[in-house]
């Protein structure tokens, strides 16, 4: 059961670090108008919200971290944006990564299953699982970044919204302290997992 003192700060703390990594390793950013910055920030912020697989997986990271308790409640939401930024750099550089869309849909299915089972693997295993999926999410975002109105603002936007989605998952996961809430979380995990499986089936049939 999660203690009441757990605080959902991990994903938000990671946001500026991940944005900085994208800035340092990506192509140099040229001067842009204020309108370009605003457009880039908005498009980066909205991009993870336009794909249900992205959105559910990021919320699931926060929920699962809350189920696991400390230190996972902050470590998993910290791991995801940091590793996602590496995947973003790979996408910006055009580095090939196989089956990106399958991996993203699979992340929702797998993380949903972890929530249903209230799985408690060693923290290192949980972090590796989350980080592995984050690479693919970051790559998908990174491939969009060079064409953005302002690449840096776009990168900052998608990292920021990732942190916010993790925080939302943690807030939802806090109901785990009550028996009825723990049951509700497993139901939410089942929905997340089912959507992930549905998306995988659709991809396979495409």
Image (spheres, rainbow, N blue to C red):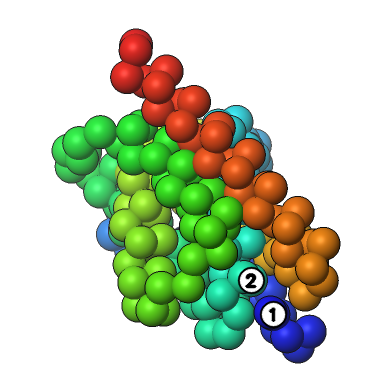
Residue placed under numbered mark 2 in the picture? 66
1 and 2 marks in contact (CB < 8 Å): yes
Q: Which residue is pictured at 22% across the width and 44% down the height?
A: 93
Q: Element type at marker 1? A: loop
C-alpha gap between disc 1 and disc 2:
6 Å
Residue 158 in view (yes/no): no
The crowd level at tag 2 (other Cα within 10 Å; few <14, some 14-19, many 20+) is many
Sequence-wise first label, 1 or 2:
1
Q: Based on the displayed image, in which of its 4 quarters is residue 34 positioned?
A: top right
> Which one is in front, 95 or 11?
11
Q: Name the residue under label 1.
A: 2
| Residue 52 seen from this side | yes
- The N terminus lies in quadrant: bottom right
- Give the side of residue 11 with respect to residue 200, left or right: right
Residue at point 41%, 79% (across, down): 123
Q: Is residue 51 above or below residue 86?
A: above
Measuring from the top left, give residue 26's x and y in whole percent. 30, 53
Return the residue found at the far top. Answer: 206
Location of residue 125 in the rendering, given as x and y in whole percent from the top left corner? 34, 72
**Disc 2, SS:** helix
Looking at the rendering, which quadrant does residue 179 occupy?
Answer: bottom right
Observer-nearest residue: 184 or 98? 184
Q: In which quarter of the image is residue 80?
A: bottom left
Relative to 25, does residue 8 appear above or below in the rendering?
below
What mark, if any, has residue 122 been given in the picture? none
């Amino acid at each position: 059961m999660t203690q009441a003192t757990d605080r959902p700060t991990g994903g938000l703390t990671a946001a500026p670090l991940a944005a900085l990594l994208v800035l340092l390793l990506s192509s140099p950013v040229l001067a842009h108008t204020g309108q370009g910055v605003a457009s880039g920030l908005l498009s980066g912020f909205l991009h993870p919200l336009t794909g249900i697989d992205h959105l559910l997986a990021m919320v699931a990271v926060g929920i699962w971290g809350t189920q696991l308790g400390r230190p996972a409640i902050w470590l998993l939401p910290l791991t995801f944006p940091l590793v996602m930024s590496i995947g973003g750099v790979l996408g910006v550089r055009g580095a090939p990564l196989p089956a990106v869309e399958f991996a993203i849909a699979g992340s929702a299915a797998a993380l949903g299953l972890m929530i249903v089972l209230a799985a408690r693997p060693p923290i290192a295993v949980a972090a590796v699982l989350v980080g592995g999926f984050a690479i693919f999410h970051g790559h998908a975002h990174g491939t969009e970044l060079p064409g953005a109105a302002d690449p840096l603002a776009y990168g900052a936007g998608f990292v920021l919204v990732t942190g916010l989605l993790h925080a939302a998952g943690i807030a939802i996961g806090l109901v785990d302290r009550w028996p009825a809430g723990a049951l509700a979380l497993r139901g939410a995990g089942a929905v997340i997992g089912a959507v992930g499986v549905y998306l995988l089936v659709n991809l396979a049939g495409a």
